[in-house]
Amino acid sequence: MSPERYNRIREMLRMRQTDLTVLMEEVHKPHNVSAVVRSCDAVGIHEIHAVWDKKTRLRRGTAMGSQNWVKTHSHDTISDAIGHLKGQGMQVLVTHLSDTAVDFRDIDYTKPTAIILGQEKYGATDVAIEQADQDIVIPMVGMVQSLNVSVAAALILYEAQRQRQQANMYDKQNVSEAECQRILFEGGFP
Amino acid sequence: MSPERYNRIREMLRMRQTDLTVLMEEVHKPHNVSAVVRSCDAVGIHEIHAVWDKKTRLRRGTAMGSQNWVKTHSHDTISDAIGHLKGQGMQVLVTHLSDTAVDFRDIDYTKPTAIILGQEKYGATDVAIEQADQDIVIPMVGMVQSLNVSVAAALILYEAQRQRQQANMYDKQNVSEAECQRILFEGGFP
Ligand SMILES: C[S@@+](CC[C@H](N)C(=O)[O-])C[C@H]1O[C@@H](n2cnc3c(N)ncnc32)[C@H](O)[C@@H]1O
Ligand SMILES: C[S@@+](CC[C@H](N)C(=O)[O-])C[C@H]1O[C@@H](n2cnc3c(N)ncnc32)[C@H](O)[C@@H]1O
């Protein structure tokens, strides 16, 4: 590995926010999954979570291809996934286009946070909405009913990035030195 | 038309920001074009601008389908488009992943503003970069080189929405009463 690349990876690992993540609930279009993962990488997310529908599970290789700098953790059910995230002390937010949802900018993202993204057509399931701590929504003033899911994800993640930058949360390394060494050695996640 | 629908369209028209727009430079994947248009509608953009590559020009019907609440103005060349926007007194910003670009959050979007979005693979052309007033970039701390184009568009547009909301720019109607009547009558743009 060239010194430039080594430094680039080290620098990336130094910025990773291990207590910020997304949980994709049956998001199934590969271009959306790929756009979500790119945005996650761009704001320093280290590991993402997903529950796949049956079809996507089968072609997951394709959908997730080349995204080996962000680790994907797959769960069998949405309850399992939410339980896992709450077990890590995270506030679990669900994007949900309801009138009672809170404006996404009114959330404190400096707390350990997981954001649930819903399926392209049907949105988040009732189970997700019930088990999450809070509904959040991105305000819209036009005629369309919703934003593209990868767009919604990025808007929330960059609000988190803005808040975390202001709180100097990108200034200290969160990934352990042992894990950094392993990733540097392997050149990414398998 | 039901009174509910009438009121919904009136409300939407009241919020439209006629001096905020995007210029898509040969963005060619239909799902990206469609996601950009949805985000434009959601922040109250009334009219967008585009320069198409040859192939997209041909299947433009499909790419732009169902997006009849945001009017698309097509231009033959990028110079024509930029000339047109500057002629309307707009600052023309180009999204460009260079070291000299300004952070997108440091821009004053309460000014009349047009944002140039580049092609998925090659980005904005040299002509666009040369003729625009300012390069802007969304900061990234990961390994990927760029964000999805519709994601980048939405991040900039929602920063503009945030600033304009703070400046009470959604509180007065910009679209003329005559145009409102025409749109209400036609049920959208043709
Ligand atoms: C196309 S939307 C699903 C629309 C579905 N009809 C519904 O009502 O939930 C797909 C996903 O994008 C995200 N999304 C889209 N627009 C959003 C908004 N304005 N606020 C928050 N999330 C949004 C959510 O994760 C949602 O589950
Ligand atoms: C995939 S990128 C093009 C990448 C191309 N290799 C380049 O260097 O410009 C497609 C478009 O998305 C937008 N974009 C992507 N990431 C961006 C970022 N971090 N800042 C600003 N615009 C971005 C720009 O409009 C860009 O032209």
Image (cartoon, coloured by chain):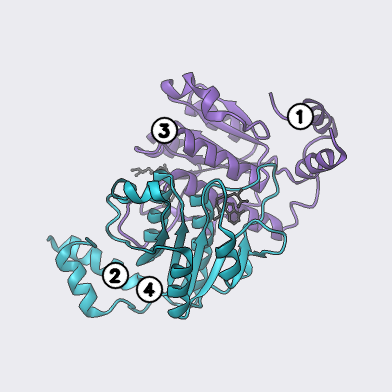
Chain colours: A purple, B cyan
Category of crowding for the residue at label 3, using alpha-carbon neighbours closer than 10 angstroms: few (below 14), some (14–19), many (at least 20): few
B28 or A143, nearer to the observer: B28
- The dot on residue A56 is none
Marks 2/1: CA–CA distance: 51 Å
Marks 3/1: CA–CA distance: 37 Å
Marks 3/4: CA–CA distance: 41 Å
Please determine whether, in this image, residue B93 is positioned above or below residue A63. Answer: below
B38 or A3, nearer to the observer: A3
Q: Nearer the viewer, mark 2 or mark 1?
A: 1
Marks 2/3: CA–CA distance: 36 Å
- The dot on residue A187 is 1
Q: Which quadrant of the figure contains the C terminus of chain B?
A: bottom left
The residue singled out by tag 2 in the image is B13
| Picture coordinates of residue A45, whole percent (x, y) | 65, 41
Category of crowding for the residue at label 4, using alpha-carbon neighbours closer than 10 angstroms: few (below 14), some (14–19), many (at least 20): some
The residue singled out by tag 4 in the image is B18
| Picture coordinates of residue B136, whole percent (x, y) | 61, 64
Residue at image location 47% in from the left, 81% down from the top = B89
> For the residue labelled by badge 1, is the local secondary structure a helix, a strand or a loop?
loop
Q: In this rendering, do the residues under marks 3 and 1 share a single chain?
A: yes
Q: Is residue B124 left or right of residue A125?
A: right
The three-letter code of the residue at mark 3 reads Val
The three-letter code of the residue at mark 1 reads Gly
The three-letter code of the residue at mark 2 reads Leu
Q: Nearer the viewer, mark 3 or mark 4?
A: 4
